[in-house]
Image (cartoon, rainbow, N blue to C red):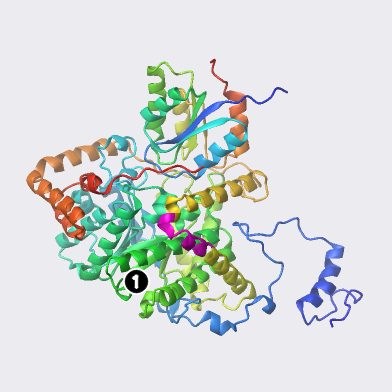
């Protein structure tokens, strides 16, 4: 079995939601799994997320939203990545996101959504299987 | 010397001590069948013994250490009659969409037997921003009710006489502004401020630690807190000026002991701040209140609440020299633990909430919110919130727990656990004191780091199957039919923006400008901020306008994130 790839991952919270228990655990689990994690902290705008993602040359962006504002914020991040020609940076996320909103988010380009009850193992395995290092 | 019991016929001994029992009857039983794998520990990982006896109690006689209800140190309860005198207030946290939507939910809850109001504001409001703020896009009315100006506040309480309800407002960074709006509504209703009862959470310290809804840095924020306390002393004497909160600290992942320690350390800081602001401790301490979490481990929660009362009483009397017995009393609201509820098999949450609510009641809470079973999925739907309210009513009317005071008092287990939790929490408080107090500890990232560690540890335990969450990592199964979930209408946001625009167009712009200028001046001069805020909100200045006006004077807080 090949060694796990070492990815560069931006992890953070977009919007005004300050509940960061989950996102910190995800950031730490991904770091413990050997990836380079850039943790942006709270209150990021979609613009800030995209700017940091491009500057830091990340492979993926992982966003946490518990506030209900996901239908606006996640597609906005994807839109901005596209506008800046950086849409090979994949986006996934988690939080309090109703099942019925997930198809719409995926159609907008979000690769995966993790909802309450997901384990850190699930997230780490998924990243291993679905996120590839971008060509550098 | 105890006799050698090992060869007695099983179960025939009558041991005189735990040691005898352990070496005889117990050893025989264990030889036949081992205990379950364990570990036997609370949800906070506090190890629990298989049996507690009188030998586990401290050297002081129970009476000396415990006290009687309504007497120092209040271990058994802060009132002499507790629920025999008056049941706890059933106060469901509520708010979503527009002020009119939430007004309807308030009336629904009051109609269904709730006895106090509790307001949930939306994220822009919580952060001191208006609905048309750039960062408010997509957030308006989603996590709570959108309040921009006094107009919204008037709609929120339309048909609700403020001299007949007590209202708790979960608001922190902009607490003074929303409080001023509440006072302005009272004025319009013709209710004298001295008649108002309620609470503003106004606990800014725990924002930096856990809830993360801030505007200004800690020190100027403490000044706003003490201004509100000072104003209430003079003008709104029945108002609870802070709800010093452990709930959010626990939700962020702390243990029960940490929840207790960090919260009381916050309380110490507020008392000190009040004294430094020139206020008399016995004047303001009686109106400080607290807010605890009630999590899954029933006995740990009961013990935590009992320890909390005893610790706070000692702190006020011995450390701060308070003489008024009302200053010694830890009065509190409790909410069942949102973080313990699952999206999977959501009806299981009714059971969890029942156990947690029972712990809060057996622990002597003055006021209680029970979560709805759809907690992990959405804001509470009508049916779910009704079940949550009925849970409290059934506990109050059918279960018998309200018939006597502190029913678990004297239990070897609960007294030993109370003592232990108190000891461990005191160690943490001591540590914080040696760092220079809670503000210094926050600036050093101490509580934030402790909480993140505890949260990560717990998640590892869950992922490893060491801690079970029914329906999530054990006893999986098909979810029942999904409950109908509350949906926030997307039209709320544009409607709110329109309303705000109309208010701004109609109001006296000059009056607003003058009020904001006076507020800025008061901030610079050290005058009490509440009167100028009151004038500003009467003029229909918005939450965002009032809060932003103070940023040039107080600065903005930027968190240094600790993973």
Q: Where is residue B223 in the image (x, y as percent from the top left)?
A: 28, 58
Q: Can residue A131 be seen in this view?
A: yes
The chain letter for the residue carrying disc 1 is B
Which quadrant is home to the N terminus of chain A?
Answer: top right
Is residue B145 in view?
no
The residue nearer to you, when weighing B203 against B555, is B555
Relative depth, front residue between B131 and B12: B131
Q: Characterize the local packing of mark 1: few (<14), some (14-19) or many (20 or more) Cα atoms within 10 angstroms.
A: many
Query: Position of B90 compared to B296: left or right?
Result: left
The residue at the far right in this view is B7
Residue segment shown in magenta: B428-440
Counting every numbered tag in the picture gives: 1
- Which residue is under mark 1? B285
Lateral position of residue B317 relative to residue B241, left or right:
right
Q: Position of residue B153 (x, y in %)?
A: 23, 52
Look at the picture and state if B465 lies above or below B328: above
The reply to whether the magenta stretch includes residue B360 is no
Q: In this view, does B331 lie above or below A89?
A: below
A86 left or right, relative to B453: left
Residue B496, percent from left and from top? 24, 40
């Amino acid at each position: 079995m090949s060694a796990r790839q070492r990815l560069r991952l931006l992890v953070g919270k977009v919007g005004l939601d300050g509940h960061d228990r989950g996102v910190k655990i995800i950031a730490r689990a991904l770091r413990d799994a050997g990836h380079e994690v850039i943790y942006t902290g709270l209150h990021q705008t979609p613009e800030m997320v995209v700017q940091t993602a491009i500057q830091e040359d990340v492979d993926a962006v992982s966003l946490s939203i518990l506030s209900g504002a996901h239908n606006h914020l996640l597609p906005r991040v994807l839109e901005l990545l596209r506008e800046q020609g950086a849409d090979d940076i994949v986006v996934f996320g988690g939080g309090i996101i109703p099942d019925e909103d997930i198809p719409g988010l995926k159609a907008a380009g979000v690769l995966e959504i993790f909802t309450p009850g997901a384990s850190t193992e699930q997230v780490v395995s998924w990243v291993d299987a679905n996120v590839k290092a971008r060509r550098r | 010397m105890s006799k050698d019991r090992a060869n007695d016929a099983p179960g025939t001994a009558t041991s005189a001590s735990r040691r005898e029992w352990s070496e005889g009857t117990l050893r025989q039983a264990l030889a036949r069948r081992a205990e379950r794998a364990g570990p036997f520990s609370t949800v906070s990982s506090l190890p629990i013994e298989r049996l507690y006896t009188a030998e586990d109690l401290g050297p002081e006689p129970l009476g000396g250490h415990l006290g009687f209800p309504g007497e120092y140190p209040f271990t058994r309860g802060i009132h002499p009659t507790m629920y025999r005198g008056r049941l706890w207030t059933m106060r469901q946290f509520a708010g979503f969409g527009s002020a009119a939507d939430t007004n309807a939910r308030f009336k629904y809850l009051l109609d269904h037997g709730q006895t106090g109001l509790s307001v949930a504001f939306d994220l822009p409001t919580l952060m001191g921003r208006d609905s048309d703020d750039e960062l408010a896009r997509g957030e308006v009315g989603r996590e709570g009710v959108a309040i921009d100006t006094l107009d919204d506040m008037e709609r929120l309480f339309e048909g609700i006489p403020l001299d007949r309800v007590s209202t708790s407002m979960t608001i922190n960074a902009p607490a003074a502004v929303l409080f001023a709006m509440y006072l302005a509504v009272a004025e319009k209703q013709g209710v004298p401020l001295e008649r108002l009862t309620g609470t503003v959470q106004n606990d800014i310290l725990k924002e930096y630690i856990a809830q993360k809804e801030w505007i200004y840095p800690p020190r100027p924020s403490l000044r706003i807190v003490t201004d509100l306390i000072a104003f209430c002393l003079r003008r709104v004497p029945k108002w609870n000026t802070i709800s010093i909160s452990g709930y959010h600290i626990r939700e962020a992942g702390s243990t029960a002991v940490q929840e207790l320690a960090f919260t009381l350390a916050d309380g110490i800081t507020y008392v000190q701040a009040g004294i430094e602001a020139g206020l008399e401790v016995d004047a303001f301490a009686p109106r400080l209140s607290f807010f605890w979490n009630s999590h899954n481990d029933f006995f740990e929660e009961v013990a935590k609440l009992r320890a909390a009362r005893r610790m706070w009483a000692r702190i006020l009397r011995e450390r701060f020299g308070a003489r008024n017995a009302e200053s010694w009393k830890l009065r509190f609201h409790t909410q069942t633990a949102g973080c313990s509820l699952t999206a999977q098999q959501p009806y299981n949450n009714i059971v969890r909430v029942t156990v947690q609510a029972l712990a809060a009641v057996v622990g002597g809470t003055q006021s209680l919110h029970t979560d709805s079973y759809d907690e992990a999925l959405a804001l509470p739907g009508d049916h779910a919130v009704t079940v949550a309210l009925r849970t409290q009513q059934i506990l109050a009317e059918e279960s018998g727990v309200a018939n006597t005071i502190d029913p678990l008092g004297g239990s070897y287990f609960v007294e030993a656990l109370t003592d232990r939790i108190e000891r461990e929490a005191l160690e943490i408080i001591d540590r914080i004191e040696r760092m220079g107090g809670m503000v210094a500890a926050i600036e050093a990232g101490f509580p934030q780091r402790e909480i993140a560690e505890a949260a990560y540890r717990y998640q590892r335990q869950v992922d490893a199957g060491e801690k079970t969450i029914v329906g999530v990592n054990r006893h999986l199964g098909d979810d029942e039919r999904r409950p109908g979930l509350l949906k926030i209408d997307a039209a709320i946001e544009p409607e709110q923006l329109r309303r705000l625009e109309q208010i701004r167009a109609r109001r006296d712009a000059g009056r607003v400008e003058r009020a904001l200028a006076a507020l800025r001046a008061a901030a610079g001069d050290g005058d009490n901020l509440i009167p100028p805020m009151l004038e500003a909100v009467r003029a229909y200045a918005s939450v965002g306008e009032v809060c932003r006006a103070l940023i040039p004077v107080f600065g903005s807080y930027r968190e240094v994130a600790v993973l």
